Amino acid sequence: MRRQTVAIAVVGLAIILIGVYTWAKSPAKPAHGGAGAATPSVSASGSPSGGSPTPSPTTKPSPTPTKPKPTSTTTKPKPPGSTRPGGTGHGPGGSMMYTGTDGVALTFDDGPDRTYTPQILDLLKKYKIHATFCLIGKKARDNPDLVRRIYNEGHTLCNHSWAHDLHLGDNVEGHIRADMQMTNDAIHAAVPGAKISYFRAPGGNFTTQMVQIAASLGMKSIYWQVDPRDWDTPTYGTGSSMASHIIGVVERNVRRGGIILSHDAGPRSGTVLAYKTLIPWLQKVGYKLIPLPA
């Protein structure tokens, strides 16, 4: 009986040992979900779906753009000689646009006028400067005292045609020559022997023929470098309105050697007012104001 009990115990122990050995060798079971748990899928980016996304590389912040410095709207005078073209320049028909020197020439057209020419002359006298007056022939005939004052105060004389015909250049050579000669004769009636060195076509409408005829009469043809359009009162008004316009145009555009166009006949209160500011300004920033050399 005793032997039988021992045999049974040995068999039982063997069974236990076999079971322990078998359990130890079997594959590990998943902790959650059992054998039917789904394997996590992988997204197109390589990150497991449902899990934490793969962190993307750190993107450096773009540098803050530098703001451009504000541009001043104040007009500053340019250095007087910085952009003057070489030589005298050429206007229509071969006319002069520049004085050929560093000096700036003020020129006044369409006079002499009994109202505004004396005001311009008084202003020039005050600042001890000289200008060039482009005279209409029939006005010179009618105002010889003003022609004499212009000449006696040292200003340069210029022929501006007999009656300011804007289409003078369209005429034949004989007509153009007669017009210029008649104008010179009217000026010389007031100031015999005075040098009339220049011609300016009405409206600046030069042709090569006009320039050649003027040259044959001893006159250089002058155009301009700056035109503030002081004659255009329908656009810019008169008085202070026109003066502000003229001042702005001249200050922005004048260069050394330039010829500035203005007028001393017509409703020219704005022109007179403008030059009360412009003459001292031009002198202050370094421009030498000259008459075109006679």
Image (cartoon, helix red, strand yellow):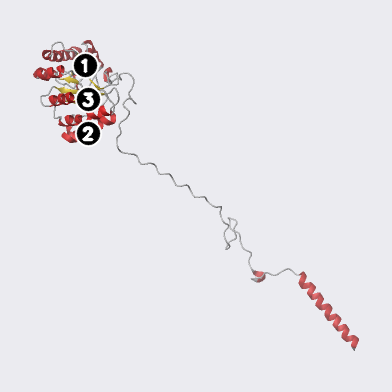
Identify which residue is drawn at 16% across, 34% down.
Answer: 239
Mark 3–mark 2 distance (CA, rounded to whole Å) = 14 Å
Mark 1–mark 2 distance (CA, rounded to whole Å) = 28 Å
Residue beneath label 2, please?
A: 245
What residue type is disc 1 on?
Tyr
Image location of residue 152, percent across then percent down: 14, 17
Image location of residue 259, percent across then percent down: 25, 23
Residue 198: assigned label = 1
Mark 3–mark 1 distance (CA, rounded to whole Å) = 14 Å
**Local secondary structure at mark 3:** strand
Identify which residue is drawn at 23% across, 32% down.
Answer: 247
What residue type is disc 2 on?
His
Q: Answer above or below: position of 280 versus 70.
A: above
What residue type is disc 3 on?
Leu
Q: Earlier in the sequence, mark 1 or mark 2?
A: 1
Image position of 103 (left or right of 273): right
Residue 92: assigned label = none
